[in-house]
């Protein structure tokens, strides 16, 4: 094994059926090694069935506090709801994890929709859930080579990391994908692979097929999911991994 490992993790498993099918295709034909499942997603049952047929795919929890009702409409709305005491964060997130467990999925990792665990009260709840449900890995969503807004966000990284480690959570050495959301393509992915630092990096991605189901869904990521799927299954991507000496990895193997 080399000194560089890459976990390729897809968010939004369970969002729509065409997203689910794109995630599975990226796993079966490409470099995707992990995904996180939305208990609140409209295509949750479809995703569970696909996960059962693909046992080599790591499945985690994509915990959601924003989205369609009864969740908050936006991150700003979530922060207002927290300030006014209108949301029971731990109870809502624990219920989502319980639904995933009840479906027979044993999750290996946790992340949050829209990275809401960067909000302090949500962070504490997620860290507690990680410990109590025995799900060791939690995303630390700060790009190792930040750009623009991601650079400012990185100032919050030490506090988030300390909080997670204090609760016994595990985090990867590095993360990538925040600044690439919506614009990850084959060329960007190849460049990223060649720039990976030593250690284990999680790459967040959002592959999928953009059919009428996704186009009708409340998300800005539509056609970009097709480009990400092409990148994850491209021969150039496999070639770059070999040239750079990067090994694909899963959370369960670390």
Image (cartoon, rainbow, N blue to C red):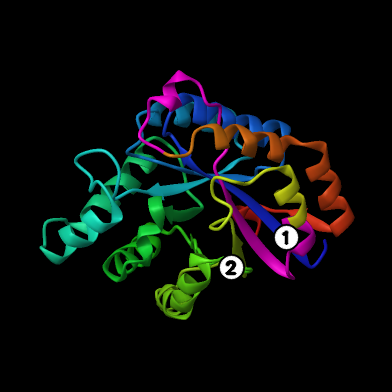
- Measured as percent of width and height from the top left, residue 186 is found at 73, 43
Does the magenta segment cover residue 201? yes
Within-10-Å neighbours for mark 1: few <14, some 14–19, many 20+: many
Which residue does the image show at 73% across and 69% down from the upper left?
A: 197
Q: Provide the residue span drawn in magenta.
A: 192-219
Looking at the image, which is closer to me, 69 or 98? 69
Which quarter of the figure is the N terminus placed in? bottom right
For the question of whether residue 90 can be seen, the reply is: no
For the question of whether residue 76 can be seen, the reply is: yes
Q: Secondary structure at mark 2?
A: loop
* Residue 174 figure quarter: bottom right
Q: Is residue 245 left or right of residue 42?
A: right
What residue sits right under mark 2 in the picture? 146
Q: Is residue 77 left or right of residue 165?
A: left
- Measured as percent of width and height from the top left, residue 118 is found at 38, 66
In the image, is residue 170 above or below residue 58? Answer: below
What separation in Å lies between label 2 and label 1 (alpha carbons)?
19 Å
What residue sits right under mark 1 in the picture? 5
In the image, is residue 106 above or below residue 54? Answer: below
Does the magenta segment cover residue 7? no
Which mark is nearer the camera, 2 or 1? Answer: 2
Q: Residue furthest right?
A: 243
Q: Is residue 201 left or right of residue 150?
A: right
Q: Secondary structure at mark 1?
A: strand
Looking at the image, which is closer to me, 26 or 92? 26
Within-10-Å neighbours for mark 2: few <14, some 14–19, many 20+: some
Which residue does the image show at 74% across and 71% down from the upper left?
A: 198
Q: Residue furthest top?
A: 212
């Amino acid at each position: 094994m080399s000194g560089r490992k890459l976990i390729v993790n897809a968010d939004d498993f369970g969002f729509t059926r065409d997203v689910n099918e794109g995630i599975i295709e990226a796993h079966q034909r490409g470099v995707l090694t992990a995904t996180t499942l939305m208990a609140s997603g409209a295509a949750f049952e479809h995703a569970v069935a696909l996960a059962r047929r693909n046992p080599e795919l790591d499945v985690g929890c994509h915990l959601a506090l924003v989205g369609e009702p009864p969740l908050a409409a936006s991150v700003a709305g979530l922060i207002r709801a927290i300030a006014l005491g209108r949301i029971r964060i731990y109870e809502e997130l624990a219920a989502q994890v319980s639904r995933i467990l009840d479906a027979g999925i044993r999750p290996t990792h946790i992340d949050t929709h829209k990275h809401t665990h960067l909000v302090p009260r949500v962070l504490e709840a997620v860290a507690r859930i990680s410990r109590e449900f025995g799900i060791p890995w939690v995303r630390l969503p700060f790009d190792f080579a930040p750009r623009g807004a991601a650079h400012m966000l990185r100032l919050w990284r030490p506090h988030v990391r300390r909080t997670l480690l204090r609760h016994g959570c595990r985090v990867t050495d590095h993360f990538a994908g925040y600044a690439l959301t919506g614009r990850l393509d084959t060329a960007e992915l190849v460049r990223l692979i060649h720039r990976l630092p030593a250690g284990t990096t999680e790459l967040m991605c959002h592959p999928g097929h953009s059919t009428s189901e996704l186009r009708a869904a409340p998300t800005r990521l539509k056609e970009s999911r097709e480009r990400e799927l092409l990148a994850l299954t491209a021969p150039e991507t496999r070639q770059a991994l070999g040239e750079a000496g990067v090994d694909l990895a899963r959370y369960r193997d670390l």
